[in-house]
Image (cartoon, helix red, strand yellow):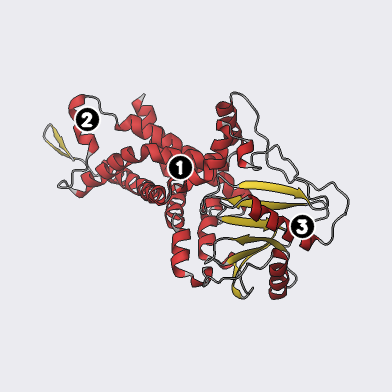
């Protein structure tokens, strides 16, 4: 059995190693993207003033003047010292811009074309391997699935035949030759990384494969089927003024009803059937506790949804919590900065495993090809 597992571990590892390396390295780089950008991009912050924030309609007017012929998607407000973030996004024609503005004056501080943003480039590598999404996404997800098998099979191969050898499996023998140190780095670091690496990989699979996501939901819900995300529709008739003033009214309403929200994001209706979405978050930097409230753009009545991304307290089942927490678990943000540090360390170890594994295979391959010299009845290599 171990020979068969070793065979699969070797050749599946060689086949998927480069992709796993790319996923792990991009994961390492992206782990602290928010902290790095906050520390290096001064336009994300403003001087607090004793003035009210400008309304979403005002930012819409200013933003569309700065980016004509582009459609505004949302306006996000944070605390008194943080710039407002205005998003322009479209699939057809395809574009993605972030605009930072002073919440008190409306001054445009920065316009970022996200197609040329470094961290978005890293994210596209992590999601799609810089390939077209319909090609890169299933390839990346498949490599992640293989990696899960590699972790499990690696543990089976790591397990010693007897208790006497067990002590040697927990530490690297630093005073040994470099090949032994490389072997220990692969085995020992791989062993310690297994629990967290499995969590990171499985949360990646939930995002990567619909069948995996639905299976996890089914198993954790006791057999229920997961409702896929859909855009709710406005079905009322025009009875209020302009769409812009309606968004302003709902923004004021959302602020009053959610005093503990650290961020409030207002989404403008993009079509005559779209709803107005208000997204509140009590833990900035994470997503799992967000409240997504959809309003009919004509009647201003809340539009209920049956998928997982509605009001947080409407769906408190274990399965829905797992789906909501999945991304924050994947990047470690679920437990704050310590979680991100842990995710970074495990991603770094994961990136090293294909490298040390390849060196082990290459060293054995070269050793097996050395010519044999016969002296009498004895054979030497």
- Which residue was labeled with disc 2? 166
Nearer to us of marks 2 and 3 is 3
* The quadrant where residue 320 appears: top right
Identified at 48% across, 59% down, the residue is 34
On the picture, is 350 further left or further right than 233?
A: left
Pick the front one: 130 or 93: 93
| Dot 3 or dot 1, earlier in sequence | 1
Identified at 73% across, 64% down, the residue is 71
| Dot 1 or dot 2, earlier in sequence | 2
Disc 1 to disc 2, C-alpha distance:
27 Å
Disc 3 to disc 1, C-alpha distance:
35 Å
Q: Are marks 2 and 3 in contact (CB under 8 Å)?
A: no
Identified at 61% across, 54% down, the residue is 132
Image coordinates for residue 293, horizontal then vertical, percent = 69, 47
How many numbered dots are placed on residues in this image? 3
On the picture, is 61 further left or further right than 261?
A: right
Secondary structure under tag 3 reads loop
Image coordinates for residue 233, horizontal then vertical, percent = 79, 46
Figure check: 344 above or below 206: below
Nearer to us of marks 1 and 2 is 1
Q: Quadrant of the C terminus?
A: top left
The furthest residue to the left? 376
- Which residue was labeled with disc 1? 200
Secondary structure under tag 1 reads helix
- What label sits on residue 270 in the rendered view? 3
Figure check: 66 above or below 73: below
């Amino acid at each position: 059995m171990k020979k068969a597992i070793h065979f699969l571990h070797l050749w599946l590892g060689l086949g998927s190693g480069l992709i796993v390396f790319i996923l792990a390295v991009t994961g390492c780089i992206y782990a602290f993207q928010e902290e790095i950008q906050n520390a290096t991009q001064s336009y994300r912050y403003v001087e607090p003033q004793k003035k009210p924030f400008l309304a979403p309609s005002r930012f819409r007017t200013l933003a569309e003047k700065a980016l004509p012929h582009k459609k505004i998607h949302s306006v996000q407000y944070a605390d008194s010292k943080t710039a407002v973030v205005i998003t322009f996004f479209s699939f057809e024609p395809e574009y993605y811009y972030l605009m930072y503005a002073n919440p008190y004056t409306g001054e445009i501080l920065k316009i970022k074309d996200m197609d040329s943003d470094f961290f978005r480039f890293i994210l596209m590598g992590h999601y799609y391997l810089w390939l077209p999404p319909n090609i890169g996404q299933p390839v990346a997800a498949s490599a992640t699935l293989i990696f899960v098998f590699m972790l499990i099979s690696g543990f089976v191969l790591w397990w010693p035949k007897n208790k006497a050898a067990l002590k040697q499996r927990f530490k690297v023998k630093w005073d040994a030759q470099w090949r032994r140190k490389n072997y220990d780095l692969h085995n020992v670091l791989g062993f310690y990384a297994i629990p967290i690496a499995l969590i990171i990989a499985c949360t990646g699979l939930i995002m990567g494969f619909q069948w995996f996501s639905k299976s996890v939901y089914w198993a954790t819900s006791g057999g229920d089927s997961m409702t896929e995300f859909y855009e709710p529709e406005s079905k009322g008739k025009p009875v209020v003024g302009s769409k812009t003033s309606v968004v302003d009214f709902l923004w004021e309403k959302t602020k009053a009803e959610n005093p503990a929200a650290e961020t409030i994001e207002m989404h403008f209706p993009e079509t005559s059937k779209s709803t107005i979405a208000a997204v509140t978050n009590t833990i900035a930097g994470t997503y799992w506790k967000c409240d997504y409230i959809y309003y009919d753009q004509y009647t201003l009545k809340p539009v209920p949804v049956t998928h997982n991304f509605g009001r947080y307290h409407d769906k408190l089942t274990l399965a829905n919590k797992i789906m909501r927490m999945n991304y924050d678990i994947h990047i470690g943000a679920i437990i704050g900065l310590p979680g991100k540090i842990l995710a970074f360390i495990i991603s770094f170890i994961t990136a090293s495993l294909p490298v040390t594994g390849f060196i082990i295979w290459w060293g054995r391959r070269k050793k097996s090809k050395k010519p044999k010299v016969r002296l009498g009845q004895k054979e030497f290599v």
